[in-house]
Amino acid sequence: QVQLVESGGGLVQPGGSLRLSCAASGIIFSRYIMGWYRQAPGMQRELVASIYSSGHLTNYKDSVKGRFTISRDDAKNTVYLQMNSLKPEDTATYYCNRYPSRDDYWGQGTIVTVSS
């Protein structure tokens, strides 16, 4: 059974930083492109960043380029999202999943709230 467990969210002021983690089990993690997704209230879930299995190729949504950094540690079956210069519009529940995502892999997510 695949399990993806996100952590690291919280309340942060605009301009602040957070580091999200996603620990995976039940999959051969190193084989897959992994992604961070987010869903704001009333909005559809969207892909924020992805990282190839090699770790050398990453892609980002335009609005987070230069502020967010995705990374992975295949030895720990973990993918990270470093978020800097956070803005109120980054407020959302953040999830990790494969890319493309699988419906049966979604976890509970971690909530990020950017507010003063």
Image (tube, grey):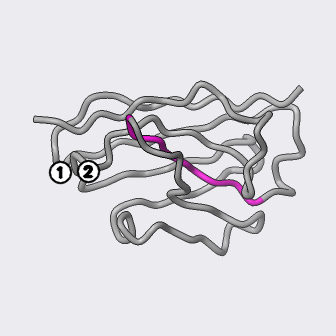
Query: What is the C-alpha distance between the residues marked 2 and 1?
Result: 5 Å
Residue at screen point 76% across, 68% down:
54
Q: Which mark is residue 15?
A: 1
Q: Is residue 40 above or below residue 15?
A: above
Q: Is residue 37 magenta?
A: yes
Question: Where is residue 36 drawn, in percent x and y?
Answer: 57, 50
Residue 68, image quadrant: bottom left
Q: Amino acid at mark 1?
A: Gly
Residues at marks 2 and 1 touching, judged by CB atoms closer than 8 Å: yes
- In the picture, the quarter occupied by the N terminus is top right
Question: Where is residue 60 drawn, in percent x and y?
Answer: 50, 68
Dot 2 crowding, Cα within 10 Å, few <14, some 14–19, many 20+: many
Q: Amino acid at mark 2?
A: Leu
Q: Counting residues from the N terminus, which is met first, the one under dot 2 or under dot 1?
A: 1
- Image-based side of 13 in relation to 106, left or right: left
Question: Where is residue 12 drawn, in percent x and y?
Answer: 23, 35
Residue pointed to by mark 2:
86
Question: Where is residue 39 drawn, in percent x and y?
Answer: 47, 41
Q: Which residues are magenta?
A: 33-41
Residue 32, image quadrant: bottom right
Q: Is residue 45 magenta?
A: no
